[in-house]
Image: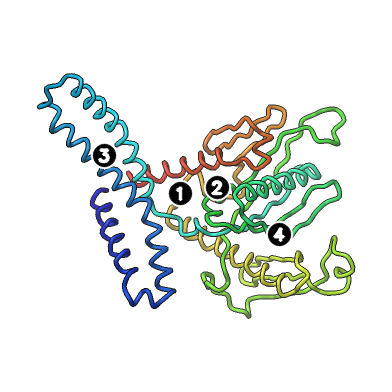
Amino acid sequence: MYAKLEEVIVKHDELLEALGSPEVLADPKKMMELNKALNDMTEIVEKYREYKRYQEDLDFIKTNIRAEKDPDMKDMMQEEMREIEDILPEIENQMKVLLLPKDPNDDRSVIIEIRGGAGGDEAALFAGNLFRMYCRYAERRKWKIDVIEKQEIGVGGMKEVVFTINGQGAYSRLKFESGVHRVQRVPETESSGRIHTSTATVAVLPEIDEVQQIVKINPSELKIDTYRAGGAGGQHVNMTDSAVRITHLPTGVVVQCQDERSQLKNRDKAMKHLLSKLYEMELETQRLAVEGERRLQVGTGDRSEKIRTYNYPQGRVTDHRIKYTVHQLDAFMDGDLEDMIDALTTFSQAEMLTSAGE
């Protein structure tokens, strides 16, 4: 590990030097690339330098403690030595985590798809609750929300909603949310007070910019239909074919958007959604080929996996993948997801460290 860390230090210093060269200063694109590379390794460089400072202090104390004659000074040195010996293993673990391969999509924005599952109207209401929960979380982090497609039902729920959350690192924080979410509660329409169980599925996709050409699409493989948008919208809804539906013929993937008044904007949103879905399919194919039967418990993206239960009578949320429970259900549904997301991230990192050790 330490040889690799020394290589990172050398690379970091080379990038710093390169940023000051006339060639880079005259090339904004190159400067942006180098700055990004520098930022990606700054945290691990600072952590390793902190580790080396503590190690130097420890070596100094060990060298001089035996020669120290003053008992009080010797006690102070021994206390400081114990403190450093407690700190170093913690920093070592932090460095190991920082050296793990970074998900190339972590910095991206996300597209989230939520659909009501088993449970009829109650499932649609729960899907609406989840939509609000993620919106509130995005608002807490000052991220922008943009709806692509929404199908509401009369009781105030949602049969389906597809939306983007635009913000630096949104995918890194939300990628573990994919799966089946289960709710246990007494529906408002239930007169006998019986607890019902309903589900909703959540899929989190990294948003792919069409310009990046990460997924190559032949225009001849697309079927693009326009139609009149439904739902709220006033006279405009009945006058123009602004809604767009795109079908990718080779895979059968269908996306649509009717949220914008402009057909062009709806087409752009739908295309980004399509690219993200195709990209996710390609990633899953590669992941299966590499991992075979051995798959991490977190981050598989399997939508049939029942990942979490929201128990309203007991006021708790339990994630079944890591056996982690939050007892503040109201706050959680209002977007206070940080503790859960941190626990999922820590668990995933531990799994990756175990795999690296093997």
**Distance between the alpha carbons at the discs numbered 1 and 3:** 42 Å
**Distance between the alpha carbons at the discs numbered 1 and 4:** 36 Å
**At 58% across and 72% down in the image, what residue appears?**
210
> What secondary structure is found at the residue carrying circle 4?
strand
- Looking at marks 2 and 1 on the same chain, the residue that comes earlier in the sequence is marked by 2
| Quadrant in the rendering for residue 193 | top right
Q: Is 21 positioned to the left or the right of 168 in the image? A: left
- Looking at marks 1 and 3 on the same chain, the residue that comes earlier in the sequence is marked by 3
Q: Which amino acid does label 1 sit on?
A: Glu
Badge number at residue 54 = 3
Badge number at residue 293 = 1
**At 52% across and 63% down in the image, what residue appears?**
282
In the image, 249 versus 159, the foreground residue is: 159
- Looking at marks 2 and 3 on the same chain, the residue that comes earlier in the sequence is marked by 3
- Looking at marks 1 and 4 on the same chain, the residue that comes earlier in the sequence is marked by 4
**At 66% across and 36% down in the image, what residue appears?**
331
Q: Pointers 2 and 4 in contact (CB under 8 A)?
A: no
Residue 122: percent from left, percent from top:
79, 42
| Disc 2 target residue | 176
Select label 2 or label 1 by which is in front.
Answer: 2
> What secondary structure is found at the residue carrying circle 1?
loop
**Distance between the alpha carbons at the discs numbered 4 and 3:** 50 Å
**Distance between the alpha carbons at the discs numbered 2 and 1:** 20 Å
| Disc 4 target residue | 147
**At 73% across and 47% down in the image, what residue appears?**
127
**Distance between the alpha carbons at the discs numbered 2 and 3:** 35 Å
Q: Pointers 2 and 3 in contact (CB under 8 A)?
A: no
Number of numbered labels in the structure image: 4
